[in-house]
Image: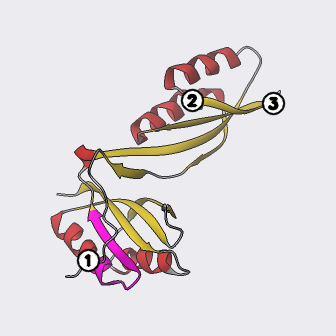
Amino acid sequence: MDTKFLLSILVKNEAGVLTRVSSLFSRRGFNIDSLSVGETESGKISRITISAKGDDYVKEQIVKQLRKLHDVITVELMDLDSTVIRELLLVKVASKKGELSDIMHAMNIFRASVVDLSPASVTLELTGQSSKIDAFIEFLKPYGIIELCRTGITAIGRGDYILKNVKEND
């Protein structure tokens, strides 16, 4: 049975690393639902967060194959119950006369922020779980979404749950 899983990967911050990681998925016919990458507290290391679906065999194979890449420092299947997961949304919505107050009311309920306002549109920023992002988008559709971009999810362990910066051996 395919289930959603989340991988956190620490890699060397070098050219071509993301290509090697993502091509590992494509060569094996596995789809990536979401991918985000950025530098860590050390500029020499980047953290990749990948969301995908698969059964236990798929998860095991992906982790084993990722650990074989020379750029990979550590790979971990995140425990979803012990992980803070967030996504960022920027969305530009048409602001027709008389509708802006409804949009602003929803913005307050969803805890979004205005990042740009013009006579023709309002651009909003929202962070949260993907389900919250999806609900906000659905609410805004009738008002006319002009443009939208999502970062994909990123995640970090709760409390003492830390992704260790240690080269793993198989």
Residue 24, by quadrant, is: bottom left
What's the mark number on residue 112? Answer: 2
- The image shows residue 32, relative to residue 62, as above or below, that is above
Distance (Cα) linking label 3 and label 2: 17 Å
Disc 2 residue type?
A: Ala
Please report the bounds of the magenta region as a residue range.
65-76
Closest to the observer, 6 or 102:
6
- The image shows residue 163, relative to residue 29, as above or below, that is above
What's the mark number on residue 168? Answer: 1
Q: Where residue 169 sits: x, y (%)? A: 22, 81
User: What is the crowding at mark 1: few (fewer than 14 residues within 10 Å), some, or many (at least 20)?
Assistant: few
Disc 1 residue type?
A: Glu
**Tag nearer the camera, 2 or 1:** 1
Residue at the spot 16% in from the left edge and 64% down from the top edge: 56
Q: Is residue 45 left or right of residue 52?
A: right
Closest to the observer, 151 or 120:
151
Residue at the spot 54% in from the left edge and 68% down from the top edge: 43
Closest to the observer, 142 or 37:
37
Q: Where residue 79 sits: x, y (%)? A: 23, 52
Residue tagged 3? 118
Question: Quick one: label 3 or label 2, which is nearer the N terminus?
Answer: 2
- The image shows residue 102, relative to residue 18, as above or below, that is above
Residue 32, by quadrant, is: bottom left
